Amino acid sequence: MAERTAPELSGKRLLLHSLASLIDQALLSGLNFALGLVLIRLASKESYGLYSQMYVAGIFAATVLESLITGPLTTIAPGQSESQRTHLVACLRRFQLQLSGLLAILFGIASVAVGRYAGVTESLPALGIAFAVYVFANALREYQRSLHFIEGRPRRVLRIDLAYALAVAAGVALLVATGCFTVPGILLVLGLANAVGFWRSGQPRPATPSAPERRAAIAEMWQRGRWALPGALVAWATNYSYLYLAAASLGVAASAELNASRLLLMPISLSVMAWSRIARPMASRLFAARDWKHLDRLAWISVAGVEAVTLLYVGVLWLALPWLETHVLGAKYQGVEPMVLAWGAYFAINAARWIGSSWLTSNDQYRLLLISGIACLAVMLVSAALFIPRYGAWGAILALIVVEVFDFILIWAVFLPRTRRQANRNANAAGA
C-alpha cells in the first residue's frame, strides 16, 4: 500500500491539484479582502464590527456541519472504492440538507434575539432572514466543494468558487450603486452568491438509498462526529471568542479594528486551508498504511511551505503598510502597524499548528482534538482575562498567540508521537 501512495506525493497530480487549490484559495482570499476593504471604506466601524461578528457566527454554523458530516466523510471516503464513496454520499444527502436547514433557522432566530439585546440599529427581521439564507446556501456550497476535494477534483472547486466570486462582486456593486450597502444586504448577497456557486457545481443527483442505509451512514458519521463536534466548537470558541470579548470590554469599534488588522493577514490562513484540503486525504491513506517515511516527508514539506509563504507575505505587507494606511484603510484605521505584526506572529504559529491538527483528524483522533480544544479554551479565557483589560485590543492578539504556542507544543510534541506509537502497537498486536 505504501508503494501506491508514494508516487502521489511526488507526481504531477499533487502539483496540479495543489496549484488549483492554491489558486482557488487565492481567489477566495482576494474576494474576502476586497469585501473587507469596501466595508472599511464605506461602512462605519459599528457596521463593520457587526458584520465581523455575523461572519464569525457563520463560521460557527459551518463548523457544526464540518464536524458532523464533512470532516468524518473526508476521513472515511478516501479509503473506499468509487462505488462505496458514491453510495455513502447519497446516503448523507438528505441529512445534510435537513441539518443545514435547521441550522439556518436557528441562527436566523438567534441573530434577531441577540441583535435586539445588543441594541443593533440594523433592521432585525431583515438581518435574521439574510443571515438564515447565508447559512443555508453557504452550507450547500461548502458541502459540494468538500465532495470534489475528496474525489480529487480541485479544478471543479475552482469553477464553483469563480461563479461564487463573480456573483458576490456583481451583488456588492449593485448594493453600492443603489445605496443599500447594509449588513443585511451584504449577507443576502453572500447567500445568493453561495446559491449560484452551488448551482454551478454540476453535481449529479445520486440515487436515493433506503432508510436503513441512510441511518447506517449517519451512525457511521456520528461515531466520529460525537467527538469532533465538541472539539470543533471548543476550538471555534478559542479562535474567535476574542472578537466578542473585545467588543464586550472595549466596544464594537474595537472588534472592527481587530478585524481590519487581521483581514490583511487572512490570505495566510486561506493558503493553509487550501493545502490541508489536498493533504488530509493523502495523510489518511499514509496513516492507514503506516507509511511513516512519506508521512514525515509530507509533514515537513507542508510546514516548510506554509511558513515560507507566511514570512514572505508578512514581509511584503509590512513594506506596503504605509501606502495601505493612506490609500486603502483610511483615517479610521490609522496606527494598525503593530497589530499587523502581532497577527503575523500569530498566523506563523497557527499555520504549523493547523497542519498538526489536520494530521490528527486524518488519523481519526477526534478525542485528542477535544482534549486539546478544552485545554486551549481554558488557556484562552485566562489569557484574555489577564491581557485584554491591561493591553486593550493588543491583549486579545497576545492571548491568541499564547494559546497557539501552547497548542502547537501539545500537538506536535505529545499527541502526534503518541498516535504513531499507538498505531505501531495495534499493528504489532494484529500481526501477532
Image: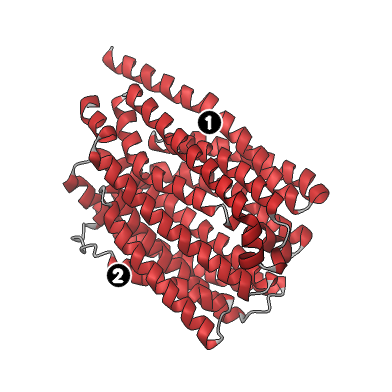
Using the image as rendered, state which of residue 60 and residue 279 is in the foreground: 279
Q: Residue at x 65, y 51 (%)?
A: 340
Task: Residue 266: give x, y in percent of width and height.
Answer: 53, 53
Mark seen at residue 139:
none
Q: Residue furthest right?
A: 390
For the residue marked with disc 2, what is the amino acid? Trp
The answer to whether any part of residue 423 appears in the image is: yes
Task: Residue 246: give x, y in percent of width and height.
Answer: 72, 56
For the residue marked with disc 1, what is the amino acid? Ile
Corner quadrant of residue 330: bottom right
Q: Residue at x 24, y 65 (%)?
A: 202
Instruction: Give the residue number, with chain letter if any, for mark 2.
Output: 199
Q: Is residue 117 left or right of residue 187?
A: right
**The C terminus lies in which quarter of the figure?**
top left
Corner quadrant of residue 26: bottom left
Using the image as rendered, state which of residue 430 and residue 248 is in the foreground: 248
Using the image as rendered, state which of residue 38 and residue 375 is in the foreground: 38
Using the image as rendered, state which of residue 408 and residue 155 is in the foreground: 155
Tell me how many marks there are.
2
Task: Residue 120: give x, y in percent of width and height.
Answer: 68, 75
Secondary structure under badge 2? helix
Q: Earlier in the sequence, mark 2 or mark 1?
A: 2
Instruction: Give the residue number, with chain letter if any, for mark 1.
Output: 411
Residue 13 vertical position relative to residue 45 in the rendered view, above or below: above
Corner quadrant of residue 346: top right
Q: Residue furthest top?
A: 432
Q: Is residue 29 left or right of residue 216?
A: right
Q: How is the image coloured?
A: secondary structure
Task: Residue 112: give x, y in percent of width and height.
Answer: 61, 74
Q: Residue at x 52, y 28 (%)?
A: 412
